[in-house]
Amino acid sequence: ERPITIAFYADWADESAPSLAKHLDQVDWVAPTLLALDPAGQLIEMQDARLRHLVQTAARRPLVVPVVQNAIEGKFDGRATAALLADASRRQALVRSLVAYLDRTGDAGIVFDFEDLPASSLGNLHRLLEETRAAFAPRQRIVSLTVPLGDPAWKPREFADVTDRIVLMAYDQHWAGGTPGPIAANDWFARQLAPMLKGLEPGKAVVALGSYGYDWHDHTADSLTIEEAWLAARDSDEKPVYDPVSGNTGFSFDEDGHRHDVWMLDAAASWNQMRILTRLGVANVALWRLGSEDPGFWSALSAWRTGGRPDLSRIDQVGNVDVEGQGEILDITATPSPGRRAVRFDATRDDVVAENYVTLPTPYVVERSGARPREVALSFDDGPDPHWTPRILSILEKYHVPGSFFIVGENGLTQGALLRRMVADGDEIGNHSYTHPNMAEESDRGIGLEINATTRLIEAETGRSTRLFRAPYFGDAEPTTTDELKPALIARQLGYTVA
């Protein structure tokens, strides 16, 4: 079998969808965190319309293999899961729920990701996997299991007969609940993996590489994307320093008397880990997680797959935004600029032996303004509505309070009197598109028509124009990056001069 690449997709992270969109052609499985177990063992399903749209419209579709976790809002409940695993009837009910879910979605299988389990429950976990495999077999669905490194109770070869893939989670040597240190040092990585690979047939193991950071401070730690770690270094006037002993990168700074220790797994660390996997005979990898990674991870992966050496010198900011100030008025004051790092490779083994961050990248900078103490702005979307808008206007008129109405052009087509009433009351009228589409899925020409038609309608009915715009809201399908909102195009349509 050819090697596979799995990418974990966090449904709770806005950065996952844009990263998947950029790298669909390098991903064989996408593993979204769409399923969880509540304390009673019932299956909870999350929806992610953007993920589904990306996969369904991709020229090269990856398999979707959702992750089921024994966690609610990031809190793993090992005791409750152990009780479920010990009960044959509850196990069978869970398997039936998973089969029904896959029947509805057409997904390719399930990744079980159970954490904080007592060692005594692992035999029952084997039974659950065995029962799941039997139920999935008629439709050739995948059964996969994540296994943590560093816990001697977990023996991957004992689950080999009831799984298609075993994903070894090769990170968190130092984790958020512990002391600061490398997240996955090279020697720890190799030393922990070697015994776990013994007894596994070739291709069974997938090694999950982390690409993220931790910021330890005040006896706790915050998870960071790599881009957030770069921004923290830039804001604190520090330079990330490569530690040749661990192969990880870190820096420290003081903020208002509080010490921060930041460690991260950047693309140089990922490349060295891939080189270690070559020496261990492993070709299947996974990424934890889409959106948190150093964009150079994908260059490293491509070079590793093709037997080359990656160019990691250019550092791009892809999804991070630096938001400053307070208020609801947003102004984009800076656009991203790339950074640069110098990487030195060992001449014989091609491992990274030195890394120097020459310049750090900069993200979009958004200035927020307009916040005033004890003052609020009232705004109303989607009208004018012949039933509700007159009632709202009457209340505003009674209390002599102005409002801002972001109108949908097709709704205003027959409500000219309401638009003129807004102007007479001193209210603001803004543009909310003509048909309320998802702007992220519209062509440039379509966006132009949506904005222009609504602006002309407002001018025709009121004698006034508007330069206010609010994008239609679409929940899970909401654009997640500034690029998707096409700010320059929209600004030009509203009459602004764009540099």
Image (tube, rainbow, N blue to C red):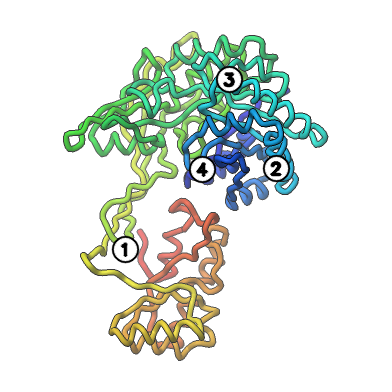
Q: Amino acid at mark 4?
A: Ser
According to the picture, the residue beneath numbered tag 2 turns out to be: 97
- The answer to whether the residues at label 1 and label 4 have Cβ atoms under 8 Å apart is no
Nearest to viewer (mark 4 / mark 3) = 3
Question: In which quadrant of the rendered image does the N terminus lie?
Answer: top right
Judge the density around disc 2: few (<14), some (14-19), many (≥20) Cα neighbours within 10 Å: some
Left or right, 233 with reference to 482: left
Nearest to viewer (mark 4 / mark 2) = 2
According to the picture, the residue beneath numbered tag 1 turns out to be: 329
Q: Amino acid at mark 1?
A: Ile
**Residue 366 to residue 88: above or below:** below
| Nearer-N-terminus badge (1/3) | 3
Say which quarter of the image contains residue 425.
Answer: bottom left
- The answer to whether the residues at label 4 and label 2 have Cβ atoms under 8 Å apart is no
| Residue 300 position in % (x across, y down) | 51, 26
According to the picture, the residue beneath numbered tag 4 turns out to be: 16
* CA gap, disc 1 and disc 4: 27 Å
Q: Amino acid at mark 3?
A: Ser
- The answer to whether the residues at label 4 and label 3 have Cβ atoms under 8 Å apart is no
Judge the density around disc 1: few (<14), some (14-19), many (≥20) Cα neighbours within 10 Å: few
According to the picture, the residue beneath numbered tag 3 turns out to be: 120
* CA gap, disc 4 and disc 3: 35 Å
Say which quarter of the image contains residue 143.
Answer: top right
